[in-house]
Amino acid sequence: MQAQETGYRRFKIESRPAPHVYPIPNRFDVRARKIRLAAMLVHEAFEYRFEKEVVLSRPCIYGVFSGHFGGFKPLKHKCVGCMRCVQEYPHIMTVKPSEAYKKLGDSFWTPEMVYTVWNEASTGKIPVKGMGYKGAFGGEGFDGIWTDMSEIVRPTRDGVYGREYISTSVDVGRKPTSIDLDNVIETPRTIEIPLPIIFDELPNGTDNDDVQTAVALAAGKVGTLDVARETRLGRPGPENLLPLIDEEGIEDYEEKQPSILEFDAEKPSVLRKLLTRFDRSIIIGRLPLREDSGQVASELARQGVHGLHLYADYHGRDYSRDPRHISTALRDVHQQLVRDGLRDQVTIIASGGITLAEHVPKAIICGADLVGIDTTILVALQAEFLGETRNRANCGLRPRRINPEWGAQRLVNLMGVWHDQLIEILGAMGMRDVRRLRGDIGRSMMDSELREQSFKGIAWAT
Amino acid sequence: MGNLELIVEKHTERIHRGLEVLPTLKHGLPEGLGNKRWTGDLILATYEQALTGDIPQNGLEYKTGNSGGGFDVLGWKTHDGVAKVDQDQIDLSIPLNKRGEGEKIEIPVPIYGGGMSFGSISLNFMIARARAARRLGTYTSTGEGGYPDQIVPYRNHVITQVATGMFGVREETIQYAPIVEFKYAQGAKPGLGGHLLADKVTSEVAKMRESSMFTSLYSPFPFHSVYSVEDHKKHVDWIKTVNPRALVSVKVSTPTDVDMVAIGSYYAGANVIHIDGGYGGTGAAPEIAKKNIAMPVEYAIPKVHDYLVSEGVRDEITLMASGGIRTADDVAKAIALGADGCVVATAEAVAVGCTHCGNCERGRGCQVGITTTDPELSQFIDPEWGEKRIVNLFNAWSKRLRIILASFGLESIRDLRGRKDLLVRFK
């Protein structure tokens, strides 16, 4: 919820360095065969007539061998994997991804993803690197979607942080489909948040006080919402809370009349109660994504719900009998609501498996208005991976002790850098407003579709 | 010889020797080398081809990477009973001007060098590329960082790039050029403009780009003077006025409507439409842009080719493809998908020692002197040595291209264009 200020202020999330407080594994394991290294030094000492500066000049510009013991005790944390030492001394040096690095994450969170989130949370800067893309060609889910771009369309871009204004604000709530000024029955029930990302409920057992405080502080600083079950009296930034209310808890909230609330929409009978008792609140139904979510969503929209929070598991798979990626499930729901003429009456929040900046625009293209992040919050706060993180009831992430201020800054940085990257995508597409991206499949490209179009006529190998 | 010179000499000699030893696999395949697109095998196979000028014989995979899609899931049909063709007689040349008017330029191999700017790469590597282009009879592109005096002697083989920042674009650099390339967008960062981080903007780079030292340089997006095909036509007219004999190439990225962009470029008077796919190289780009914006070139080529055919203009414009062309097989597959030829840059960098580690954007930049402006590191690449390696690489690629063409009984690379029927797909 944007603070009302006098005068114009362009939305910007202020990042500040928030370095890792727990050591992170080195990416690379650098090793020298010590006897060969000693022999090489002796050989070079004679070759260069004991010119110390020449003999001890090292095959690394990143300082891996700048410690007191040079190659005998490489400073592994400085290695960027450039391989020059291996190029120069292939008989002595080896560089490979470290075992600790390879073990990061789980079957969904790759080490690269964990590192990316850590670094974004630490620096708040867009990851910029040289050379081209290094990963798999396409893939499933978000990996199989490319966003469109425009060769010549504004808004212009002058550098990473300089460009014409692009709005990332979204409305949460229900809008009437037409306005009749002579007969105002329903006023729009919406709130505006400045970026299409909220902090979703944290996995069971991971929301200790420090983590809760960090999330609440960050939500306040960024101006977004955080979903939580407890009332959390005395918590910072209560105006940013999106309380998740169950039937038994309705009475607790009646007096507070929050501006927005979520309920478990698997019990649709609660909706009528909520609509009556919270007649000024925005009411969001929380629903697991399944095969029939489209129909359920339409039904809830007809009954008057203001928004739907559709969630997949933490690996981005829905709860269908044959689980689909959230991108597919979202498209189904979005299209069903469009077909039923109800799409513009409800806001869709999507969560589960939103772990990288590019997932935000891609989820929006698939039909969401905004997304929620969950395990990504914990990863940014350097939680420990204890196993698989897929299951909502038993997620293999354990938060560590943190200073809430530090945690809040990490999350602010993460939101800042995701916001900047969202703007990069929107700018490349020639869009000035993230609202325009919603469900705009025509401005995306699907690997599976392009493959069939472009490789049509090419026989399968036998 | 002072110590600094000795240090440079020592490391130069060892890097160069390493590039010879590593592909022998005497010390095994380095585990930390490569990635899914540029595998360790491909990198070493490129070193080997750059050393010998021949196809690797020691079992290194030199045809495809391991990305699981695109060129990496395409292979060649096996054909029996095709007419025997003398490989030495196979024609690999392609025309760069298919229109009725203007200079008739052909290149003897279906490849020319892509834009890598002064500042993003070292001057020595730039000169090595220009020398190699001259020796091969093809071209290299300046990129958008200006036209150093040292490459003027090779100007008949240098394409002048005009990009949105207009860095170093002067009347004489347009007049030097047999081909002028408009860079509307770049595959690695479509829609985002250029990016040279402050650390690499040394006094020489700043002078060339008429900017301030150690200040990050961005070229804007898009061209502030072009918002339609008509505006683009004005650009082409401007170049033709300054240099009437120059051919015009239009480098674009690969959006959904890349076919429309191509036809627009044709009607604006371009001789070459150059499509740069999303998996291309760069000196620095936001990681999010490399993977997520615009389609890979494998999908864009047939789209553009088919559309130009349906519009009846395919034989009046040359279609060049880039953005992830790593091997001779990639070149041949791109042509079979519908391109006339390919534009290559990263493979040239690998030929002189690049490991595709992706640290080009940093302060001193590249550890082996390719993507750096550091005076010491730049010396690792002697232009003559670099020239030999790049020439050898393309000679090896030419051999492989001839083998592919001979296997189908084709006498010219031009006959391969659009022959998707000669490809097979792997699951």
Image: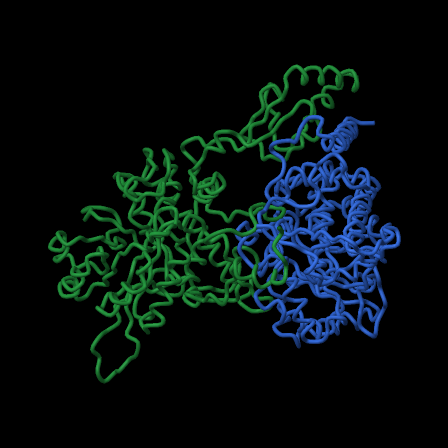
Chain colours: A green, B blue
Instruction: In the rendered view, tell whether residue A142 sits above or below residue B371.
Output: below
Instruction: In the rendered view, tell whether residue B268 sits above or below residue A32.
Output: below
Say which quarter of the image contains residue A118.
Answer: top left
Residue at 72% x, 37% y is B377
Residue at 32% x, 72% y is A340
Position in image of residue A196 (x %, y %): 38, 58
Instruction: In the rendered view, tell whether residue A181 sits above or below residue B28.
Output: below
Relative horizontal placement of residue A132, taking residue A230 as reference (left or right) = right
Say which quarter of the image contains residue A251.
Answer: bottom left
> In the displayed image of the protein, which residue is found farthest to the front?
B81
Residue at 19% x, 66% y is A280
Which quadrant is the N terminus of chain B positioned in? top right
Residue at 28% x, 67% y is A298
| Viewer-nearest residue: B410 or A165 | B410
Asked whether the viewer can see residue B218, the reply is no
Relative horizontal placement of residue A305, taking residue A38 as reference (left or right) = left
Position in image of residue A219 (x %, y %): 32, 51
Relative horizontal placement of residue B384, taking residue B366 as reference (left or right) = right
Relative horizontal placement of residue B341, taking residue B72 as reference (left or right) = right
| Viewer-nearest residue: B308 or B81 | B81
| Viewer-nearest residue: A383 or B170 | A383
> In the displayed image of the protein, which residue is found farthest to the bottom?
A182
**Count of numbered badges drawn on the protein:** 0
| Viewer-nearest residue: A333 or A176 | A333
Instruction: In the rendered view, tell whether residue A416 sits above or below residue B3.
Output: below
Position in image of residue A338 (x %, y %): 36, 71
Asked whether the viewer can see residue A360, the reply is yes
Position in image of residue A417 (x %, y %): 46, 50
